[in-house]
């Protein structure tokens, strides 16, 4: 007589494995939801830096990249992808606050100031559109100066928002 090979044992092993995988999946989803709803995580919309002249768009893009890099090094702070907020760039900040559940907006602009480039960065309350902090600096356009400006700005923003830096 042929005995069934493993029959019910295989079913039990597969069911146990499936339940364990489902449990792990549920735990990960709950962890992600908890982290996204935590009150100690600050959500920021980083509006792409505006360049007044076409020749300054490269500097604006560099500044955007540096800001993102420095923001990622700040614990308890998350910002939205550029493509997510670029469509709402022309809408009022309270709309952005509701749409993305952000608390703060960082915006910037670049323009020519005599023989230098004037860079302005602002931290804006997303609900009220009131500026909480702003920094303006004239630079020669070098990457080192842009990086120093970003570090100074993020340090000040971290102080205003009472965030820890990694």
Image (cartoon, helix red, strand yellow):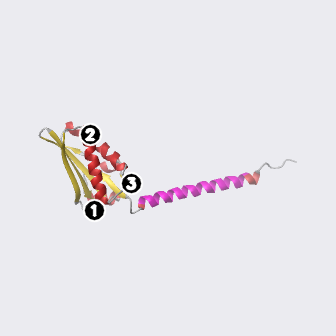
Determine the secondary structure under disc 1.
loop
Q: Which residue is farthest top?
A: 55
Q: Is-magenta flag for residue 30?
A: yes
Residue at (67, 52) in percent of width and height: 14
Residue at (72, 51) in percent of width and height: 10
Query: Rounded to the nearest whole Å, what is the CA distance between mark 3 and mark 2?
Result: 24 Å
Q: Which residues are magenta?
A: 10-36
- Read off the residue under disc 3: 75
Label drawn at residue 44 = none
- Residue 41 visible to an observer of this rendering: yes
Q: Main secondary structure of the magenta part?
A: helix
Residue at (27, 54) in percent of width and height: 156
Q: Is residue 87 left or right of residue 113?
A: right
- Read off the residue under disc 1: 127
N-term-proximal mark, 1 vs 2: 1
- Read off the residue under disc 2: 144
């Amino acid at each position: 007589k042929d005995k069934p090979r493993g029959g019910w044992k295989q079913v039990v092993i597969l069911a146990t494995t499936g339940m364990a995988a489902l449990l792990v999946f549920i735990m990960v989803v709950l962890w992600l939801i908890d982290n996204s709803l935590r009150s100690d995580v600050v959500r920021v919309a980083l509006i792409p830096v505006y360049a007044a002249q076409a020749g300054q768009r490269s500097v604006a893009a560099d500044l955007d990249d540096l800001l993102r890099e420095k923001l990622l090094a700040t614990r308890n702070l998350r910002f939205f992808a550029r493509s997510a907020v670029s469509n709402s760039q022309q809408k009022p900040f309270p709309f952005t606050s509701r749409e993305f559940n952000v608390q703060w907006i960082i915006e910037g602009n670049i323009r020519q100031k005599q023989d230098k480039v004037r860079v302005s960065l602002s931290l804006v309350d997303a609900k009220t559109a009131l500026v909480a902090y702003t920094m303006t600096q004239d630079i020669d356009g070098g990457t080192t100066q842009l990086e120093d400006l970003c570090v100074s700005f993020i340090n000040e923003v971290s102080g205003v928002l009472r965030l820890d830096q990694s």
